[in-house]
Amino acid sequence: MFPLLATWQNVPKPEFELPRGTRIRDYEIQEKIGSGGMGVVYRAIHLRLANHCAVKVIAPSQMHHPECAIRFLREMQAAGKCRHINLITAYDAGECDGMYYLAMELIVGSTLKDMVQKHGPFAAGKVLEIARQIASGLHDAHEAGLVHRDIKPSNVMLTSSGVVKILDLGLATIHGIPDPTNDHTATEAPCTTSEDSITRVNQQLGTQSYMAPEQCDNPHAVDARADLFSLGCTCWYLLTGKVYPRNTAFNFDHHCRTYSIPEQVRGLLVSLLANSPEDRFSDASQVIKAIDRIGNRKPNRMRMTSLWVGGFVALMIIWLASEAVFRKLRPIQEPVVSVNQDPEIIPIERGPMPSIYHPAPGAGVLPMTRDEAKQLQTKWAEYVQIQPTMTNRFGIEMVIIPPGRYLIGPETMSEVVISKPYLIGTREITRRQFQQFIQAEKRTTYMENINKGVWYRTETSGNSTIEKQVVVPGIHCDNPGYTPASLDDPVVHITHSEALLFCNWLSKVEQRTYRLPTEAEWEWAARAGVASRFPPEVQSHPERWLNIAWLTKNSNMHPHPTGQLQPNAWGLFDCLGNVAEWCADYFGEYPPGVHVDPAGTANRQAKLRVYRGGCYHSQFTTYNDRRAFINYMGRSDVGFRIVCEP
C-alpha cells in the first residue's frame, strides 16, 4: 500500500492539529490529548452512539514515510485482535480524507513513568499488583499471537480505580502475518528520535533501555519472552525510579539491598531479567503464578514461648467466659426506621480480586449474541473456579456475571466499565426469603409499624393511561394487598434501608458479603449482551413481551411468583417486568466520560435511591429506564435482588 523510498530524511514530530468539530467518519474531534512520533491523539465523540473515545490520527505529512505508515497499520491490526481489561480496546480503524485513524477507548489516568517521576518509586506490593495486571494483558496478547515488543513505563497507564492499561501496539509482531518492518530494501531512517526510543528499519525496534538482549540482536525473531524481560525492566523502574542498568559492572544483589527490594521480589526479577530467554519464565501465566505465590506467603514470626502462649490462652478463656455472661444480660438494640430518620446503612464495598485469578477471559462488549453471552459467562465461571449457577441455604439462586463495558447514559455520553465478575440473584428476593430474615431478627417493617402502604396501579381513560397511587391501611410485606398472594412472589412494601438490613443479616449468617447491586451492575446483568434499548425478540414481535415480563397485559395488576417467564441469556428472570428493584445508588445524573465500577452519584441531600426495571403496571420498559424514590418508604411495585462476590 505504501511504496518504500530509496532515501529518507529524518521524520519530524507531527505539528498538525485538527480543530474542534472536525469530523473523521463518525467521530467528531473535541480536543487534543496527546501526540507522538507518528500522530496525534484526540478526545472525540462517536456521533451516532454518543460515546466518548480516543482517536489516534497519523499526520498527513507522515503518510509518505513507509516506516511510520506501516507501524500505524500494524497498530490497527494488533489492536483489533485483543479484548482484555488490561489492553487498550480498539473500536474502529480506517482512512478518511488521506488520514489514517484508530478509534480506541478513552482512558483516564497517568502513565507509570509519569507517576514515578511525580511521586517516586512504588512500594513492592503495588509493583506486584501492577506487574500481575501487565502479565495478564500480555498473556491474552500472546495467546492471540501478538508480541508487544515495547513494554515500558510510558506505555502502561494506571487508572484512578487501579486498572492497568497496556498502550501502543505499533511495534507488535502478529503471528501468521509477515512483519513488513523486516525489510532490507530501505535505508536507515528513524521514525522517532527520542533519546531512548529507537525504531529503525534494519536496526532496533523498541525502546533500548527496556529491550531484551535477543531483541537488540534481531527484533523480528523474538517471542513472548522478550516482553517478559521488558516487564522485568519496568518493575525495576517502578521499584527504584531508575532504568535497569545493562553494564557488566552492575551488582544486582547490592542494588536490591540498596533499594530494600524484598527477597521474594528479587527472585521474580531474576527470572524476568535473565539474559537468555531459556532462563526466563516460559510464558506470562507463569509470571502470574509466581506473583500469586509471593502474595500468599506469610512472613516469618518469632516463636512464642510456652509461658506467653499459656498466658494468652488463659486471658482468652477469661474473656470468653465474661462475654458469655454479659451477652445474656445485655438487651438487644433494635434499629429504628422512621419517616424522619434514615439509618444510612452503607452498602458493603466490593472486595479485591481474589489471588486465585489467572489470565482472564476477555471482558464483554456490546452487542453480543445470546450464544456469545452464554459462552463468556461459562468462561468466567471456569476462570474463578465456580459453577455458573449456585444456590445458598435460603434458596437464593445466583449466577456469575462477567465484566464488561457499555453506555449507561446515552443522553449524557456516560460509559461504564465493570472491571470484575460478580454474582447476582437470578430472581428477586421472595416474600418467603424475607420472612426468614424478619423472624430471625425478631423485627417488624416500617410499613407494618405505620399500618398503611402505598399501592400503585394504572388507569386508562380514553387513549391516555395514568399512574395512580393509593394509600391502603394495613398492607405491608406480610399482607401485600392482592390475591392470590404467594410466598414465592417478590417481596414488596420494603424500604431501601430494610433491603440493606436484609443484606447485612444474610452476610452475617452466610459468612460472605451480600449487598444491593449498583445500578451499573444491575443494567449490565439485565442486558446480558443486548446493545439496544429493548430485547431483540420484542422489536419485531411486540407480543413476545408477554413471554419475558409481567406487564399490564398479563399481570392482572399485581406481582407474580418469580422465575415463571423466560430468563435472559445470563439466567436472570423478571428484570423488565414484575416488580422494579432497589439499587445501592443515590439518584443523580452520570457526568460524561468513562466510569470504572461506579457506585452512583453522591446526591445524598435528596435521599432518593435508584430503582431499576419494569413492573406489573408498566406498559413496557427499557434497559436504561431509571427512577428514584425516597429511601424510607416502600411501594407495592418495588422489591430487590442481591449480589455478592464470587
Image: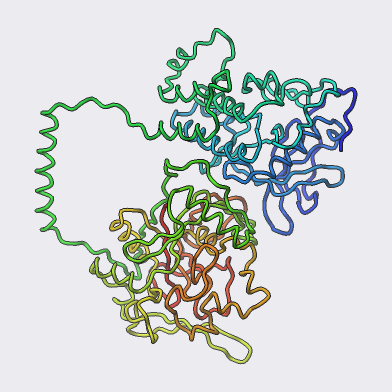
Does residue 3 appear to the left or right of 72 in the view shown?
right
Judge whether residue 604 can be spotted in this image. no
Seen as rendered, the residue at the extreme bottom is 462
User: Dividing the picture into quarters, in which one does residue 170 lie?
Assistant: top right
Q: Residue 625: image x %, image y %?
A: 57, 68
Seen as rendered, the residue at the extreme top is 249
Say which residue appears at 57% left-offset and 63% top-offset. 527
Q: Residue 81: image x %, image y %?
A: 67, 44
Where 61 sits versus 351, above or below? above
Say which residue appears at 62% left-offset and 57% top-offset. 407
Judge whether residue 423 can be spotted in this image. yes
- Colour mode? rainbow
Q: Residue 68: image x %, image y %?
A: 79, 32
Which residue is at the front of the view, 379 or 48?
A: 379
User: Dividing the picture into quarters, in which one does residue 618 lie?
Assistant: bottom right
Does residue 632 appear to the left or right of 128 in the view shown?
left
